[in-house]
Image (cartoon, rainbow, N blue to C red):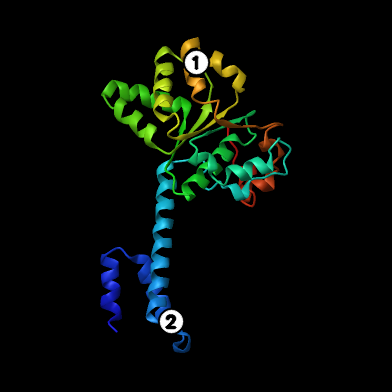
Amino acid sequence: MLTHPTLDQMASLGLNGMAAAWRALAEQDPGEALDRNEWLGVMLDREVAHRADKRFANRLRNAKMRFPNACVEDINFTATRGLDRRQVLSLGQGGWLKAHEQIILTGQTGTGKTWLACAFAHQAARMDYSVAYARMPRLFEDLATARLDGRFPKLIDKLARVQLLVLDDWGTHSLTDQQRLDLLELFEERYQRRSTIITAQLPVSGWHQMIGEPTIADAILDRIIHNAHRIDLKGDSMRRKSTKPELTTTENAEIISQDQ
């Protein structure tokens, strides 16, 4: 059997998963050897898994999330902050992504909004959805710069196409006329086509006033709120509950790595 030339051909074709399976199978005890059909099945399964892992890693890297390692499995339900386990685990199944719905996370600083948003985004990437993360102040800066240098249509198109967009720190300041129009254009492009996660300290009841101009505020909120799953986090900052030893351990990443 031409083991090495075959492995070289697999490598040249980018079949790294199949090559790894080949090596593992070749080291098996001859008495436990699989037949040729079983070999092929194992190699194909390994290649599929390898490519899925690679896509997932690429999606996480491209998303540039604040907490890329946050995940649904590590969510802390013991803290008193109003988290509904059933709701969270249901959202973890991803049905809201298929339905192009939104998640709105509100609460005081330090209650875990950003971490939870990243956990849901991590789950979406695991399910093979494209993900992007942006803080609202920085997003408005990028949009303004793109408008000046002619990249605005391309940037809006990029934001409109991503399957899950995480908008962090929503409502930290009132909007200018141009920022209102930019938001309206973005949500118009995404409406009923893509999903969005929004985190905000400002309660939803204050969003209309924050946006400003009533007609545009109505249009923007109509595209966000009516099909959104809301999670309103209660309580004080979880950072205050962390003791010094917790600052040097990673046993509970959620408590240590909270949103600002």
Give the vertical position of 12 relative to 125 (above or below). below
| Marks 1/2: CA–CA distance | 64 Å
Of label 1 and label 2, which has the lower sequence position?
A: 2
The amino acid type, in three-letter code, at marker 2 is Leu
128 sits to left or right of 94 = left
Residue at coordinates 42% horizontally, 30% vertically from top-left? 190
What is the secondary structure assignment of the residue under circle 2? loop
Which label sits on residue 200? none
Q: Quadrant of the C terminus?
A: top right
Query: Where's residue 212, x and y in %?
Result: 50, 12
Which image quarter: residue 206? top right
215 sits to left or right of 233 = left
The residue under label 1 is 217
Query: Where's residue 129, x and y in %?
Result: 44, 45
Q: Which of 130 and 257 lies nearest the eye of the viewer? A: 130
Query: Where's residue 36, x and y in %?
Result: 37, 80
Q: Quadrant of the N terminus?
A: bottom left
Which label sits on residue 34? 2
Give the vertical position of 21 relative to 241 (above or below). below
